[in-house]
Amino acid sequence: MGYEVVSEGFLNTDDRYQSMVIKEKDDLDKILKQQGVDTESIKIDLEKETLALIVPDKSSYPDRISIEEIKKNDQHLINVNYSIETASYVREKNEEVNKPYKLIKIFPAGKDFTRVSFRETNSKSPVFVNNSVENIIKYTNVLEDNRENLFLNYLPLDKGNSWTYDFESPRGKGSQTFSIVTYTNGWSIFDSYFGMSNLALRLDRGGHIHVSSENGNRPFYTPDVLVSYKKEPYKSGTFEFSEIMVVTSSENSNIEFKDIYAKDVGLIYHEHKTNEGVAKYSLTNAYVRGKQIP
């Protein structure tokens, strides 16, 4: 597959963008105007081209994004592999910029290819510390009373699984795909996961989730979260699921969120509140254990 750079540079400190697919011309114009780019000079055919915004998680000024490879797999998922390079020439930094971005159009693609997986090829591997069950299970007893319905049943972490979400937030709309690219030592490593690159998830023998990143290992949820199960139809877009698990923040939590999981599918809905408003992610399609959903 081919690609062309539409725009690149550095995001302002207040621009909290993540790597994503841009589906609407209005959302493209909003991003470009924030970066001071003349939108009239940009020619895009969304029927034949897929727009992808690359924003590395850990990178900062004055790094540069270099595209290593773009290819499509059998599930119509476009894999964008890129690396981060340190700029040989550094202009005086504008205090308002903080991290690099690259906006590209991929072709031949278009509306049938809105699932894009972003992977930073030279990023550091997650740090697997204290990863024995004996060391960490004592911190995650949130589901002790629900052993018949643990995350083992609601979060398939097989290599090759991927989930695509449409999202909307006060900053705009778009699409993001998260894929499991490697499985090692009991950890499923994602290309990216809600803005974090090279993050890994793991289920212990008790069915609890643990997350590992460059910041180390910790429980995915704090012990005060609220968990409920429903065996009734739940609709999300064109989907209907019969068995779901809902995880929400407690009343005293500093962060308000809701996660909804479907049995044998994974996370199908996520929302969280920020100072700017509410961000919502809804599953549009997935590839889980060899099955395309829907």
Image (cartoon, rainbow, N blue to C red):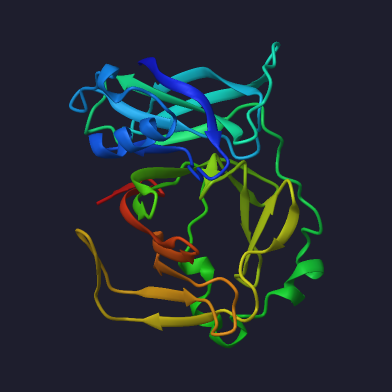
Q: Position of residue 238 (x, y in %)?
A: 19, 58
* Residue at x-position 52% and y-position 69%: 151
* Residue at x-position 66% and y-position 65%: 204
- The quarter holding residue 125 reads top right
Camera-side residue: 6 or 158? 6
- For residue 128, above or below residue 98: below
Camera-side residue: 61 or 173? 61
Side of 168 where 222 appears, left or right: right
- For residue 49, above or below residue 117: above
On the question of residue 213 being in view, the answer is yes
* Residue at x-position 45% and y-position 60%: 276
- The quarter holding residue 43 reads top left
- For residue 199, above or below residue 243: above
* Residue at x-position 69% and y-position 21%: 92
On the question of residue 115 being in view, the answer is no
Side of 13 where 168 appears, left or right: left
- The quarter holding residue 59 reads top right
